[in-house]
């Protein structure tokens, strides 16, 4: 995918993947997730690519999550299959041989938070916000793999805070935790990103690759199965009602069933 909802372009050694649905706060479609996988393949086969950058169009969001319309009529089994498709993309992004950078300007939520987290580095504007608000929006859950990504980058306590209270992290707070590598003023993301990219391009490729792989292997070494968690949450009445409420604008009432 090289245009439309996902714009992929190569310039000066940087393969940029831009999420291009600004009117929907760059909510992700299945085709967009597949486009990320294709971009990762290109990054590993095109010798001109030195860095892979993910960013959002419009200045209001990196990614606001998966487009909720895609969850209409989901069962628990559908949820398990959906999370397996997401894991394929997340793991592929984690395994890209060149350094990966998430350039965040605005909201970074849901699946967008996982994609940003699995990148090697994150650069953000000062007004950016990072969150996983599903406890008050959809009532579903993350896969075990995605829980692992967040815990490995944020720690278990902060991951639980994000998930249980559905409270977003501001850019400065995210920087203080080490999650964000660099914070810049609004309007200065391109300049900050250029500095990070220049540093990465000057460093030894094999050293960076080995570090990336070591961290990825440590994260995955003790990854347990969690399909039962996904099946119960996605197959719940709460989730089905929340998806319908999103479409109608009605408030969701949680029952725990």
Image (tube, rainbow, N blue to C red):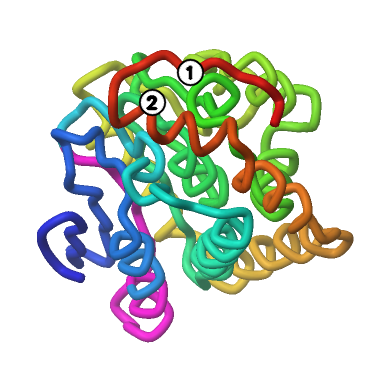
- Image-quadrant location for residue 37: bottom left
Q: Which residue shows up at 17% across the image and 55% down it?
A: 5
Q: Are marks 2 and 1 in contact (CB under 8 Å)?
A: yes
Q: Residue furthest right?
A: 222
Q: Magenta segment: does it hold 50?
A: yes
What is the span of residues highlighted in magenta in the rendered image?
Answer: 39-57
- Image-quadrant location for residue 166: top right
Look at mark 2 in the image and give the residue it sits on. 245
The answer to which of marks 2 and 1 sits earlier in the sequence is 2
In the image shown, does 168 or 249 lie closer to the viewer? 249
Res. 43 in view:
yes
In the image shown, does 114 or 95 lie closer to the viewer? 114
Q: Which residue shows up at 58% across the image and 31% down it?
A: 238
Alpha-carbon distance for marks 2 and 1?
A: 6 Å
Can you give x and y, in whole percent of width and height, for residue 66 in the image?
39, 45
Q: Which residue shows up at 51% across the image and 31% down it?
A: 138
Can you give x and y, in whole percent of width and height, for residue 56 in the image?
26, 41
Look at mark 1 in the image and give the residue it sits on. 252
Can you give x and y, in whole percent of width and height, for residue 157 in the image?
79, 23
């Amino acid at each position: 995918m090289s245009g439309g909802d996902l714009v992929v372009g190569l310039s000066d050694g940087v393969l940029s993947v831009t999420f291009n649905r600004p009117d929907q706060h760059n909510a992700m479609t299945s085709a967009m997730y597949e486009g990320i996988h294709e971009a990762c393949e290109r990054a590993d086969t095109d010798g001109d690519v030195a860095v892979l950058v993910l960013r959002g169009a419009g200045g209001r969001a990196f990614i606001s999550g998966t487009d909720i319309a895609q969850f209409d009529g989901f069962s628990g089994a559908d949820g398990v299959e959906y999370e397996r498709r997401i894991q394929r993309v997340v793991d592929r992004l984690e395994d890209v041989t060149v350094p990966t950078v998430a350039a965040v300007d605005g909201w970074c939520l849901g699946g967008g938070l996982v994609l940003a987290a699995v990148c090697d580095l994150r650069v953000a504007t000062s007004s950016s916000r990072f969150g996983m608000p599903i406890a008050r929006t959809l009532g579903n859950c993350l896969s075990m793999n995605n829980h692992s990504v967040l815990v490995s980058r944020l720690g278990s306590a902060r991951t639980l805070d994000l998930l249980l209270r559905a409270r977003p992290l501001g850019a400065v707070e995210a920087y203080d935790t080490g999650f964000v590598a660099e914070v810049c003023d609004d309007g200065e993301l391109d300049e900050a990103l250029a500095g990070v990219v220049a540093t990465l391009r000057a460093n030894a490729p094999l050293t960076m690759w080995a570090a990336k792989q070591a961290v990825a292997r440590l994260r995955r070494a003790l990854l347990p199965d969690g399909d039962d968690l996904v099946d119960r949450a996605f197959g719940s009445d709460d989730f089905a009602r929340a998806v319908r409420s999103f479409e109608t604008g009605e408030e969701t009432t949680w029952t725990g069933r």
